[in-house]
Image (cartoon, rainbow, N blue to C red):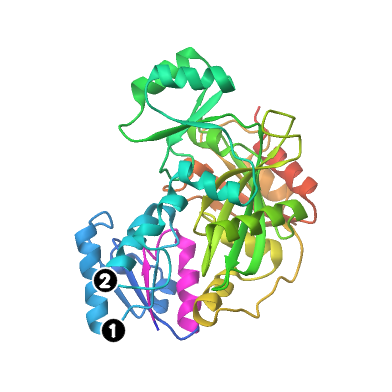
Amino acid sequence: MNFIYISPNFPANHWNFCHHLKENGLNVLGIGDAPYDELSPELKSSLTEYYKVSTLENTDEVFRAVAFFTFKYGKIDWLESNNEYWLERDAWLRTEFNITSGFHTQDMEPVKYKSKMKENYRKAGIPVARYHMVDDEAGCRAFIETVGYPVVAKPDNGVGANDTHKIRNEEDLKHFFLTKHDEPYIMEEYISGEVQTYDAIINSRGEPLFENGNVTVTSLMETVSEQKNCCLYERSILPDDLKDAGRRTVKAFGVKSRMVHMEFFRLDRDQAIGKKGDIVALEVNMRPSGGISPTMMNYAGGTDVYKIWADMIAFDHSEKRKEREEVCVMASRRKGRNFVLSYEEVSETYKDVLIEEGPIEPALSGAMADYMYLANFRTEEEARAFGAAVLEEQ
């Protein structure tokens, strides 16, 4: 079986996906723009062959790389990047080379455009925020008159919280129109709640082989737009209502043979869309949770999601299971802030629970800050207390 992995070196932990694919007997063919000598030894040993392009942004070069692998190894069975940024291009390549696994070009609108996602969320029976496709200031003001300030505006086809604007008043609205890019934006009523996710590895019949989720303690929108510190945690056991919402969403979107990251709000107060504690749709991501999250899932559950995913690809099932029910928390700091606990004091105070600490890859630091601490706890309350202590500023 031939598997092309786009950008296998980024994020750095994705070598684990390649490693387990190779262990399962697949030819793992990498396409990336990093020089071969800069690949980690673990990634090099996991790849059958690596094709370097000058930049992954060059569609023609990537197309030629896939054509070369097809000529040399025969029909390609799978092609994935597991990266939000490349999902549409992945789908286009599958379409061009008749790779039958995964999304094709005609499948992409409901999984990439936030406005199109809402219909499938409705089919799943999950409330969605009222929205307006940004046209002009007058049209947006009319929408705001209905839902009230604040509102949130972001690219309809965007990645993460990039270019997301919280518009609180008329001045913010004018600034948004002066600075926004020339692309479609969606404007939504502001939902007050905590972002909680349903993460799963889904087999070819739409059944979960693995389920867990994360909780974003600090707002990702503010972490990106206001360059704040970051705290989130992975929990190996999900609340029943969130698990049910995730499974219904998987079914509504027709997900098969993928790892997914589905985002929801849990309302923190009564509001127009629902009561405090209700689950409300945010958006779907048809790829693994970003950055180091898969490794955090492993720490929380005592398992190996990289292997479970590779087993799904190769065998459509996995014998790998969770061995514990804990919470893995990441507290990450921005450079140049004055914290109550020094870096050395954090390391000493929490030495019995710390799993890892160190700098975050620069390409991910916009969303996840600059220096992280990972720790495991039995309860969510302990995880939240750790995050608050590590990130407390003077």
User: In this rendering, would 295 be left or right of 275?
Assistant: left
Q: Residue at x 74, y 71 (%)?
A: 323
Residue 35, numbered label: none
Q: Amino acid at mark 1?
A: Tyr
Task: Classify mark 1: residues with Cα within 10 Å, few (<14), some (14-19) or many (20+).
Answer: few
Query: Was residue 6 drawn as part of the magenta stretch in this picture?
Result: yes
Which residue is farthest front? 123
Residue stretch rendered in magenta on the structure: 2-23
Q: Residue at x 37, y 63 (%)?
A: 104
The question of residue 62 being in magenta is answered with no
How many numbered marks have been drawn onto this rendered protein structure?
A: 2
| Residue 29 image-quadrant placement | bottom left
> Can you give x and y, in whole percent of width and height, for residue 167 in the image?
50, 22
Q: Position of residue 6 (x, y in %)?
A: 36, 65
For the C terminus, the image quarter is top right
Residue 348 lies left or right of residue 62; in this view the side is right
Residue 79, picture quadrant: bottom left
The dot on residue 66 is 2
Question: Taking the image as drawn, is residue 361 in sight?
Answer: no
Numbered disc 1: secondary structure: helix
- Helix, strand or loop at disc 2? helix
Circles 2 and 1, Cβ within 8 Å, touching? The answer is no
Q: Position of residue 82 (x, y in %)?
A: 45, 62
In this orientation, which residue lies closer to the viewer: 247 or 236?
247
Q: Is residue 184 in sight in this rendering?
A: yes
**Residue positioned 63% across, 38% down in the render:** 218
Mark 2–mark 1 Cα distance, whole angstroms, equals 10 Å
Q: Residue at image x 44%, y 39%?
A: 162
**What mark, if any, has residue 73 been given in the picture?**
1
Give the residue type at disc 2. Val
